[in-house]
Image (tube, helix red, strand yellow):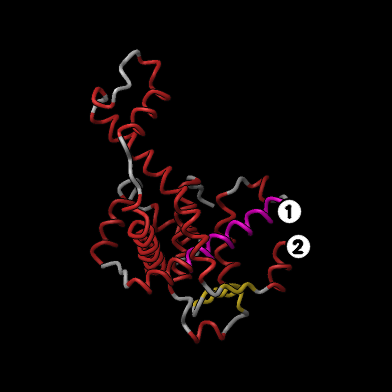
Amino acid sequence: MVRYSIKFIYLICFLWVGYNLAGCSDFEHKQKDVYFIKVGDRTITVADFNKAFEIAKNAYPHNRIQRSNVVREARLRLIQQMTEEMILLERAEELGITITDSQVEKALRDIKRDYPDNVFQEILLEYAIPYQSWKEGLKTRLLMEKVVAQELGDKIEITHDDISKYYEEHFKGDNTSPDVKAVSKDINNIIIKILRKEKMEKAYVLWIKKLKNKCAIEINKKELEKMIGM
């Protein structure tokens, strides 16, 4: 088996999950297997979940994923991820948010820029994932990111005091002024990105909780017990 970086395995897994989610409202697909998670009209089947989890396991060190407690935690993490992503897709539909082909192609070029030309083909073949399916997964991930940005982006405010405080806490050993006006443009931009990400993550927790309370979410308890040993 060809070995790849953990970062890239995560990327493959998440985009494959995204592909499964993109097609999860198809009626014929729902009829072919036992359902596992339902959010609104969207369904993830047991087969969908198991296939995604087999790929997700490769992001864990081999000796750790052999432990039953690690497997349980990994399954629960993937269940939460898939449920939240289905909620985001429902929200995208409500808001009429879409992703164009040109946006997908740009994201694809940006991702491939960091890897040798043959890496994508090799790893997709290794996990029997069709390239077009992976690409559809990318489109789904971009759609979910766009929903989060549209819903939370305008609510995130980075003040001069935020930047000055962060600068003082992380750069005070440089013997330079913590005054935001004295911070170089490059460092200033880096700090803004870090602070925006931190605030987005905090805002996301409360926001997704509210959406969960509004959505009709159903998890097959019998199948859940089988998976996590409840």
Residue lying farthest right?
A: 230
Q: Which mark is residue 206?
A: none
Q: Position of residue 117 (x, y in %)?
A: 33, 51
Q: Nearer the viewer, residue 100 or 119?
A: 100
* Residue type at tag 2: Gly
Residue lying farthest top?
A: 175
User: From the viewer's perspective, is 86 left or right of 108?
Assistant: right
Magenta stretch encompasses residue 84: yes
Element assignment for label 2: loop
**Which residue in the protein does label 2 denote?**
229
Magenta-drawn segment? 69-86
Q: Residue at x 48, y 65 (%)?
A: 211
Q: Nearer the viewer, residue 117 or 105?
A: 105
Q: Residues within 10 Å of mark 2 (few under 14, many from 20)?
A: few
Q: Is residue 117 above or below residue 169?
A: below
Q: Label 2 vs label 1: CA separation?
A: 9 Å
Q: Residue at x 23, y 30 (%)?
A: 185
Decide which of tag 2 and tag 1 comes sooner along the chain.
1
Q: Is residue 15 above or below residue 170?
A: below
Q: Position of residue 10 (x, y in %)?
A: 49, 52
Element assignment for label 1: helix
* Residue type at tag 1: Ser
Q: Residues within 10 Å of mark 1 (few under 14, many from 20)?
A: few
**Quadrant of the rendering where the C terminus is positioned:** bottom right
**Which residue in the protein does label 1 denote?**
68
User: From the viewer's perspective, is 85 left or right of 95?
Assistant: right
Q: Quadrant of residue 195?
A: top left
Q: Nearer the viewer, residue 135 or 209?
A: 209
User: From the viewer's perspective, is 20 left or right of 105?
Assistant: right
- The mark lying in front, picked from 2 and 1, is 2
